[in-house]
């Protein structure tokens, strides 16, 4: 009887963990917001003000928590990358 309870508990936990994976897969097709950072065309075109934006390079290996990358070969054309090498 004890063995049956353990098997049922393991099966129930396996089923619950697979439900979480299914929702993650279905949410992966949702479109994401993308942002483009580009420098000013020239120094005279830049707005002079008291604030500026600094984008630093990541220093740790785990900075990105996603495996989805968007490449923009042209300014108005997006191409998602399915696999990350």
Image (tube, grey):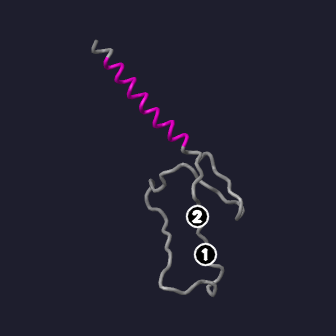
Q: What stretch is highlighted in magenta?
A: 5-26
Q: Is residue 20 magenta?
A: yes
Mark 1 highlights which residue? 39
Q: In this view, does 85 lie above or below 77?
A: above
Q: Nearer the viewer, residue 40 or 21?
A: 21
Query: Residue placed at 56% from the left, 45% from the top?
Result: 28
- The percent position of residue 21, horizontal first and vertical second, equals 48, 37
Decide if residue 46 is in sight here.
yes
Q: Is the magenta stretch mostly helix, strand or loop?
A: helix
Which image quarter: residue 3? Answer: top left
Q: In this view, does 48 lie above or below 74?
A: below
- The percent position of residue 22, horizontal first and vertical second, equals 51, 36
Q: Give the left or right position of residue 27, taking residue 13 as reference.
A: right
Q: Residue 35 carries which label?
A: 2
Q: What element carries label 1?
A: loop
Q: What element carries label 2?
A: loop
Q: Give the left or right position of residue 30, taking residue 74 as reference.
A: left
Decide if residue 85 is in sight here.
no
Q: Nearer the viewer, residue 81 or 19?
A: 19
Query: Residue placed at 68% from the left, 53% from the top?
Result: 79
Query: Residue placed at 43% from the left, 58% from the top?
Result: 60
Total number of numbered discs in the rendering:
2
Which image quarter: residue 40? Answer: bottom right
């Amino acid at each position: 009887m004890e063995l049956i309870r353990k098997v049922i508990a393991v099966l129930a936990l396996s089923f619950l963990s697979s439900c979480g994976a299914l929702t993650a897969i279905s949410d992966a097709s949702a479109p994401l917001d993308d942002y483009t950072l580009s420098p000013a065309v020239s120094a005279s075109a830049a707005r002079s003000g008291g604030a500026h934006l600094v984008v630093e390079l990541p220093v740790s290996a785990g900075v990105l928590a996603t495996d989805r990358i968007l490449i923009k070969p042209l300014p108005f054309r997006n191409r998602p990358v399915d696999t990350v090498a």
